[in-house]
Image (cartoon, helix red, strand yellow):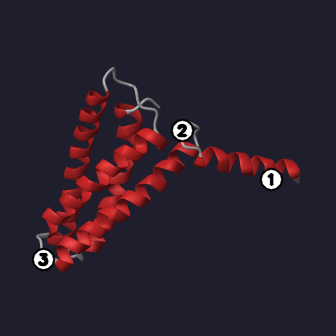
Amino acid sequence: MYKKNSALLNYFHQLFTLSPNTKTVIQPLRFVITGAFTVSIDLLILFLLYKLLNVNYLVAAAFGFLVGSLINYLISIRWVFINGKYRFQSLELTIFLLTSTVALLLNQLVIYVSVEKFSLPVIFSKGNSIVVVTVFNFLSKKFIVFKG
């Protein structure tokens, strides 16, 4: 029993330690936690701009996505991925922004198609885009932007 509890405590310690971790289970879980946090910021901005300030839904979605992506980068380099794949952090940030631009285009496309072609509500459409973009983001960040 003690050994089982010790293993569980070790797992949680690895999960919540500040340094990045490339373990198969820990890193994707950290990515999901980080993503859930930054998606909530993204959704909050989308809601505030679209519903309260009557900003066009695509403009509101893009702004929320960009703010969420920047916060995601800052958390990712401290907690999720090991940065340093590139010699200069400015190059890493540039590549991160390029992959985020592709993710933004995917985000906008899924939202647009969901709203305009399928007449789904904007917030539900954003949910559709989260599914598509999350997979792209994890794979691009893990294999293109950061070390492991």
> Residue visible at 19% across and 79% down?
52
Badges 1 and 2: C-beta atoms under 8 Å apart? no
The dot on residue 19 is 2
Q: Which residue is mark 1?
A: 5
- Between disc 2 and disc 3, the foreground one is 2
Earlier residue among tags 1 and 2: 1
The answer to which image quadrant residue 60 occupies is: bottom left
How many other residues sit within 10 Å of disc 1, few (<14), some (14-19) or many (≥20)?
few
> Residue visible at 33% across and 67% down?
127
Given residues 1 and 24, the one toward you in this image is: 1
Residue 148 x/y as whole percent: 47, 31
Q: Secondary structure at mark 3?
A: loop
* Quadrant, the N terminus: bottom right
Earlier residue among tags 2 and 3: 2
Q: Secondary structure at mark 1?
A: helix
Q: Is residue 75 left or right of residue 6?
A: left
Residue 137 x/y as whole percent: 35, 46
Q: Is residue 130 left or right of residue 31?
A: left
How many other residues sit within 10 Å of disc 2, few (<14), some (14-19) or many (≥20)?
few
